[in-house]
Image (cartoon, helix red, strand yellow):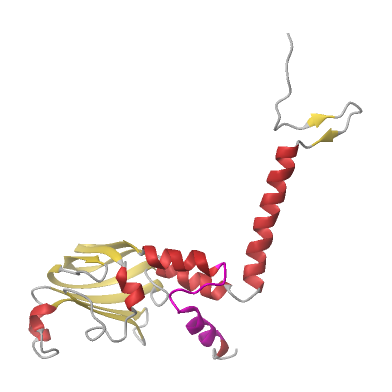
Amino acid sequence: MVTTAHPEKNLDNGIGIITSSPIQRMKKIRNNTLALLVIAAIFSGCATGRLADLRDCGKISIGVGAGLGADVGLGALVHPSVGILAKTYRVGSESRNVYSVWQEGEIYYPVVFFPALFMTDSPWAYSYNRTCMDWSQQSLAEKNEKWLNWSPMRNPGESGFHRATDFEAGVTLGIVAARVGLNPLECLDFLLGFCGLDIANDDKLEKQKATHAPGP
């Protein structure tokens, strides 16, 4: 019976020395090239920006606490909620400012309508409030005041680029809570960052933080 060597397997050159096939050599070159690109990205100083952009790509967290409510965000279009109140302790990653472990408080509609009477001229459009603090509750990590629709006047501290395709859903039922989300525009910003492009214009903020970070 005649057998043929597989083109991707090592071949014996007739004198007992095993050599690699052209396909194997090409795969090895490709893998080495990718590894060098990753190393170059790390040592070129862009790793901080890439990690921050990666955290902005989506949301995933679980938590324990107490509360009842749910909210859904469809980018800048709408962010409705329904429920009462929630106070939870979370673990996960939701943005460049909120990751690892933190605690948060949430106020859902229609309860959020009543404090909105004293906070804004348009309480009818105020749909959800969420405040995230670090674990020790010493500093504010992020504050989200969600309206039925996003606008730069209602959310002056929030990036319109980040909000445009920020899709998310969160729920708190009794003592358990969870949140998941995906931001396609931030995913594109993350990938283009390896080519030196910053379409979200947020990498310079991470460089400034790194430059002004206190020493040991």
Quarter in which the C terminus is drawn: bottom right
Please tell me which residue lies in front, 165 or 95: 165
Q: Residue at x 68, y 45 (%)?
A: 27
Q: In the displayed structure, would residue 11 be above or below residue 91?
A: above
In the image, the segment drawn in magenta is 194-210
Residue in the foreground of this view, choosing between 92 and 150: 150
Q: Specify the farthest residue to the right.
A: 15
- Asked whether residue 197 is drawn in magenta, I would say yes
Q: Residue at x 11, y 73 (%)?
A: 109
Q: Residue at x 34, y 79 (%)?
A: 159
Residue 100 in picture, x, y percent from top left: 42, 71
Say which residue appears at 67% left-offset and 51% top-offset.
31
Tag count in the figure? 0
Identity of the residue furthest to the top in this view: 1
Q: Position of residue 32 (x, y in %)?
A: 70, 54
The image position of residue 146, as x and y in percent, is 21, 76
Q: Position of residue 46 (x, y in %)?
A: 58, 74
The reply, left or right, for residue 135 in relation to residue 13 is: left
Tell me if I can see residue 54 in this picture: no
Q: Is residue 149 magenta?
A: no
Residue 212, image quadrant:
bottom right
